[in-house]
Image: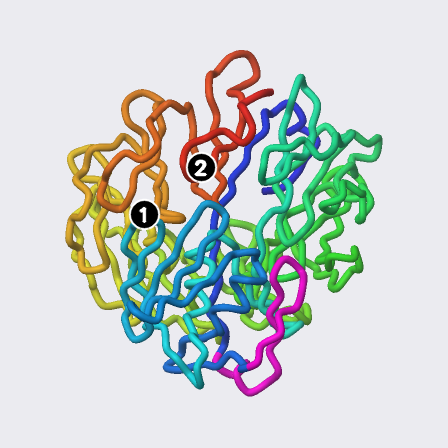
Amino acid sequence: MMVRKKRVALHLILSLMACLTGTIPIEASNNALTIRVDGEPVTFAQKPFIEDGTTLVPFRPLFEKMGWQVDWDPQTRKVIAAGDGLKVEMTPGVNAVDVNGEDAVLDKAPAIVNGTVFVPLRFVGEASGRKVTWIERLHTVTIGEPKLYPIQHHGKYGLVDHHGQRVMDVPYSSVLPFSEGLAQVWNAAEDGNGSGYIDDKGQLVIPRQYYETAPFSEGLAYVTVLIKQDVKKHQYIDTTGKVVMEPDILFGSQFHEGLAAVAVAAHNDNGYTYGYLNVKGEFAISPHFDFGYDFSEGLGRVKNGDKFGFIDITGTLVIETKFDDAWDFHNGLAPVKIGEKWGYIDKQGNWSIPLQYENAQAFSEGLAAIRTGNKWGYIDSKGKLVIQPAFENTKPFASGLAAVQIGDWEWGYINKRGEVKIKPTYYLAEPFAAGIANVRVGWEGEGPDSGYIDINGNYIWTPSR
């Protein structure tokens, strides 16, 4: 989300998604790989490795680094980990795992290698609610969560911790959620360049010198500097504020899987065309698409004319542009639309779930929301209906729970059996991340009050504005 001057009047909008980018390029396995948890490197007695395209990492040191307690039950041969209000149970050699009493299925079963339990890297994020990111230029995997959360109270911004303790006030007109340890802030500036970044101590570590800022992703952030009216300088900066590249573009976006979709001027009906930059600032994929979207699971969604398709990291069109609408790949499947119906394709473009739905969302934790009969329900990756359509709106599963709308602006949370676990009492509700979710109640004046709940529905910060 970009921070702009005109947004100062908006209420606090938080979107704490467990955005998982846990796929590591296979070639990374041949080089030294650094894994950091909340900024701190993890030391492994046995190194992570890649098997059948899946990155496997030692379970215990990662979860203990996150502050979880890890135990081994020799009688049941189960590994048990608990933290952040969550509990995970798994058995080596078995794909099925238990997360807070809910079943989950791993792409690859946990394995014991020389006495150490290894699990798929992506599972670390899914189980803990943390964001897993591959930073290609640093050959590093980061696993993190926000340490602080922005709140508004009596019109002033502050930061609270996981326990809802108010840590500090911050003197800004707008504060957005933390990403990779930094949060975007904004105050009015005469030249329009009022955006910068603070760290988790509330210190302004990257000055307010930008017209627009975006959240950090894979160690870089897209920013612009207003030179004069309608003239902007486009840059990508690192977490120290150093300018890494200054491309000649019209629009930019965040890096995902080592590539960023950008637009350059063109003599066509749009006035621009999209390509993809690599982390060196070079065009890895030349601009020749009407629109380009983020890469996900090795494929990028593109649009030419009024049709959508998918390209690989070389820019080769591997799934032709024939869909009327489409979303990104998650859990190996992408929702696509032809005519008035939605279905799901695999990465080869084959139909995994035929066209049959009024609408469809991406998979998360093995389930995807679909709409039929004007109501939303959930299917599994085989297309089996596992939660009957009964909801006005839905959001993806995270930490075993999904936010759903029941009735007029009454949001709550269900588990993977469709049972209501947190009553629908919120005006809006976001997915959980590291055991915490942003919720909003009421709608008066400038907007709803914003607060945070834990996995049991208890407030850690009572909604305020």
x and y percentages locating residue 430 in the rendered image:
44, 37
Q: Nearer the viewer, residue 396 or 360?
A: 396
In this rendering, is residue 17 above or below 393?
below
Question: What is the residue that sits farthest to the top in this orientation?
Answer: 445
Q: Position of residue 35 (x, y in %)?
A: 60, 70
Span shown in magenta: 26-45
Residue 227 visible to an observer of this rendering = no
Q: Amino acid at mark 1?
A: Gln
Res 43 visible: yes
* Position of 7 relative to 319 (above/below): above
Question: What is the quadrant of residue 163 in the picture?
Answer: top right
Q: How many marks?
A: 2
Q: Position of residue 362 (x, y in %)?
A: 34, 52
Q: For the residue marked with disc 2, what is the amino acid?
A: Glu
Which quadrant does the C terminus fall into?
A: top right
Q: Is residue 395 left or right of residue 226?
A: left
Please tell me in which quadrant of the rendered image residue 162 appears. top right
User: Residue beneath label 2, please?
Assistant: 430
Residue 308 vertical placement versus 6 (above, below): below
Left or right side of 189 for 309: left
Circles 2 and 1, Cβ within 8 Å, touching? The answer is: no
Which residue sits at x=28%, y=22%? Answer: 407
Q: Give the number of the disc on residue 376.
A: none
Q: How packed is label 1: few (under 14 Cα within 10 Å), some, or many (20 or more)? A: many
Residue occupying image coordinates x 64% and y 47%: 214
Q: Reading the chain from its start, which is encountered first: label 2 or label 1?
A: 1
Q: CA distance from mark 2 to mark 1?
A: 15 Å
Residue at 67% of width from left, 34% of height from top? 159
The N terminus - image quarter:
top right
- The verdict on residue 33 being magenta is yes
Specify whether residue 292 is painted magenta.
Answer: no
The residue tagged 1 is: 361
